[in-house]
């Protein structure tokens, strides 16, 4: 996956969250989410320390085009099908798009599939955060 742009201030806040859950990503939960304009917003919290309001959660804004790219790369908005070549009459496997990524997410995906897409985005961000800092020698 291409690099996800994380502002420096947010990177520091994400690090505090990662440290507060003892590097156990499974403890980081998406308390809520919202698509607005050009962004999807996640409110993150520790599953062992639930917050009383979203104002207390870490607010993470991700550009919709980055979310769409992850959906496409993960194949959430497509399925694999067998097609028959029109002229040569041989069959082949092909990925078939259900819809463009954001339309698929909004209109076609089940609540479970939407959750999978959001969790995949969070995992990609946390993985990038850790890998970037380790490769830079900052840990």
Image: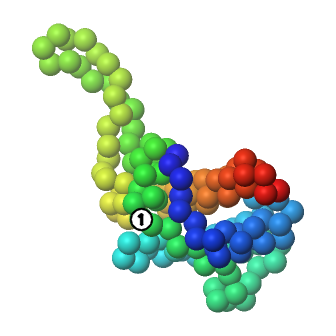
Residue 1 point in image, percent of width and height: 52, 46
In the depicted view, which residue is nearer to us: 75 or 20?
Answer: 20
Residue 130 point in image, percent of width and height: 72, 54
Residue 123 in sight from this viewpoint: no
Residue 93 point in image, percent of width and height: 35, 23
Q: Quadrant of the C terminus?
A: bottom right
Q: Is residue 114 left or right of residue 138?
A: left
Q: How is the image coloured?
A: rainbow
Can you name the residue that lies furthest to the right here? Answer: 22
Residue at screen point 81% across, 77% down: 49
Residue 71 in sight from this viewpoint: yes
Residue at screen point 32% across, 43% down: 97
Residue 46 point in image, percent of width and height: 77, 72
- Rendering quarter of residue 63: bottom left
Asked if 10 appears above or below 114 in the picture, the reply is: below
Task: Give neighbour class at mark 1: few <14, some 14-19, many 20+ (Cα, 10 Å).
Answer: some
In the depicted view, which residue is nearer to us: 14 or 79?
Answer: 14
Q: Is residue 126 left or right of residue 85?
A: right
In the depicted view, which residue is nearer to us: 85 or 39?
Answer: 39
Residue on which disc 1 sits: 64
Asked if 118 appears above or below 76 in the picture, the reply is: below
Can you name the residue that lies furthest to the front here? Answer: 137
Residue at screen point 63% across, 85% down: 54
- Rendering quarter of residue 36: bottom left
Q: Is residue 23 left or right of residue 132?
A: right
Residue at screen point 73% across, 55% down: 133
In the depicted view, which residue is nearer to us: 16 or 24?
Answer: 16
**Does dot 1 land on a helix, a strand or a loop?**
helix
Asked if 74 appears above or below 133 in the picture, the reply is: above
User: How many numbered circles does the render carry?
Assistant: 1
């Amino acid at each position: 996956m291409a690099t996800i742009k994380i502002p420096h201030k947010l990177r520091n806040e994400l690090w505090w969250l990662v440290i507060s859950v003892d590097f156990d990503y499974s403890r980081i939960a998406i308390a809520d989410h919202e698509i607005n304009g050009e962004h999807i917003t996640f409110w993150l919290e520790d599953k062992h320390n639930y917050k009383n309001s979203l104002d207390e959660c870490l607010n993470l804004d991700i550009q919709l085009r980055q979310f769409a790219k992850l959906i496409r790369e993960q194949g959430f908005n497509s399925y694999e099908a067998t097609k028959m070549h029109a002229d040569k009459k041989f069959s082949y496997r092909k990925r078939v798009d259900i819809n463009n990524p954001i339309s698929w997410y909004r209109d076609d995906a089940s609540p479970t599939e939407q959750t999978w897409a959001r969790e995949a985005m969070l995992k990609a961000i946390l993985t990038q955060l850790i890998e970037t800092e380790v490769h830079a020698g900052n840990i």
